[in-house]
Image (tube, rainbow, N blue to C red):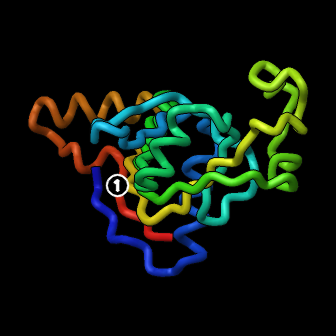
Amino acid sequence: MRNMAPMTDHTDDVTHLGELLEDIDFCMLTTIDGSGQLHARPMSTQKMDFDGTLHFLTDRGSHKVEDIERDPQVLVAYADTKAQTYVSVHGRARIARDEALIEELWSPAHRAWWPNGRTDPSIMVLSVDVDRADYWESSGSKLTQLIGFAKAATGHGSGKDLGEQGTIRP
């Protein structure tokens, strides 16, 4: 993979990170629990224009809320294995009851967790303000990637040519 220098323009950084995450629905949110251990769980990123903050709906009674209130540092890991795109987002999380944002993020699928609808008082917005994101993305089609891997494995190419990686600081 080709190592890309960090981008310098904030707008370009936010746009690029938004594009990387756009088609990846599920991620793993990692918090630090009360005993100092890392705890990861799957989450679905809510679709909206990315502005440097990720948003999720969560329940007031979940353990992740306790973890974040104790230590807001989180890691959110995304993987799109079909496109060979991987993103590790580092940031600070916060929990709030934001009626307008709940309204914006709500979808009918959320009734599986909150059967009483979007007015359920236990619904909270978990927001992650992104400090840094590391990404790895492959270039070309699957066939191009396969040929590149074969060349690298036989000494006729380099794994550095298979895509790019970089760090974004929105």
Q: Is residue 3 above or below residue 26?
A: below
Residue 154 drawn at (x, y percent): 11, 30
Q: Is residue 131 rendered to the left or right of residue 97?
A: left
Q: Is residue 139 visible?
A: no
Q: Is residue 131 above or below residue 117?
A: below
For the image shown, how many numbered marks are present on the structure? 1
Which amino acid type is shown beneath numbered disc 1? Gln
Q: Is residue 5 visible?
A: yes
Residue 16 drawn at (x, y percent): 56, 61
Sort mark 1 into few (<14), some (14-19) or many (20+) by Cα contacts within 10 Å: many
Q: Nearer the viewer, residue 109 or 118?
A: 118
Query: Residue pushed farthest left?
Result: 155
Q: Residue at x 44, y 41 (%)?
A: 77
Q: Residue at x 28, y 41 (%)?
A: 36
Residue 136 drawn at (x, y percent): 38, 48
In which image quadrant can residue 3 be found? bottom left
Residue 2 drawn at (x, y percent): 29, 56
Q: Nearer the viewer, residue 71 or 41?
A: 71
In which image quadrant can residue 26 be found? top right
Q: Is residue 38 rendered to the left or right of residue 133?
A: left
In which image quadrant can residue 132 be found? bottom left
Q: Residue at x 75, y 36 (%)?
A: 122
Q: Residue at x 79, y 28 (%)?
A: 110
Q: Say what secondary structure mark 1 lies in.
A: strand
Residue at label 1?
165
